[in-house]
Image: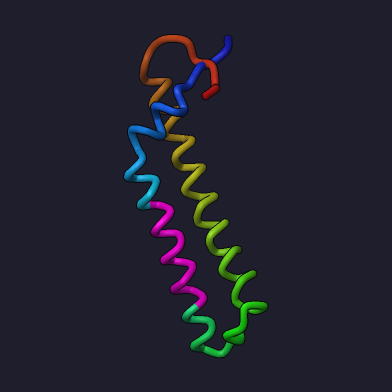
Amino acid sequence: MINNIDVDGFVRERQDEIMQLVNSALNRAGDIVKEKVSSGEVEATIQDVLPLLLYEVLVTNTVSTLRLVAEMIDFKQAGTGNNRVGH
């Protein structure tokens, strides 16, 4: 059995939520970096801050993406029709 999920439709329906998640990830990462710089854990240089900032954004976005994918799969399983993953 091949499952079909309307990814584009799902993203369109949740565009505001996705934008909110991205903004939250960026704000969270910025707050963590600010805290670590303030406490002296890292220097306020691009070499020290950028890897930490990227790590925090990736972690938060990965968790958010997995949650959205789980919602997408649950949403499709609750519906009817062909269930093939695609765009």
- Identity of the residue furthest to the right in this view: 47
Is the N terminus in the top left, top right, bottom left or bottom right quadrant? Answer: top right
The colour scheme used here is rainbow
Depicted 7 relative to depicted 32: above or below: above
Look at the image and say whether residue 30 sits in the magenta stretch.
Answer: yes
> Residue 2 is drawn in which quadrant?
top right
38 drawn magenta? no
Q: Nearer the viewer, residue 10 or 76?
A: 10
Q: Where does the image place residue 11, in percent across and percent down from the top left?
A: 41, 34
Instruction: Please tell me which residue is depicted at 45% across the width and 62% down the height of the picture.
Output: 26
| Residue found at x 43% / y 54% | 22
Outermost residue toward the front in this view: 46
At x 44%, y 73%, the residue is 31
Q: Taking 82 as reference, is 76 above or below it?
A: below
Q: Position of residue 72 (x, y in %)?
A: 43, 30
Looking at the rendering, the stretch of residues picked out in magenta corresponds to: 21-33
Residue 16 vs 34, above or below: the answer is above
Q: How many marks?
A: 0
Residue 44 screen position, x and y as percent: 57, 85
Front in this rendered view, residue 44 or 55: 44
Q: Quadrant of residue 78?
A: top left
What's the magenta bit mostly, secondary-structure-wise? Answer: helix
Q: Quadrant of residue 16?
A: top left
Residue 75, image x and y in percent? 38, 26
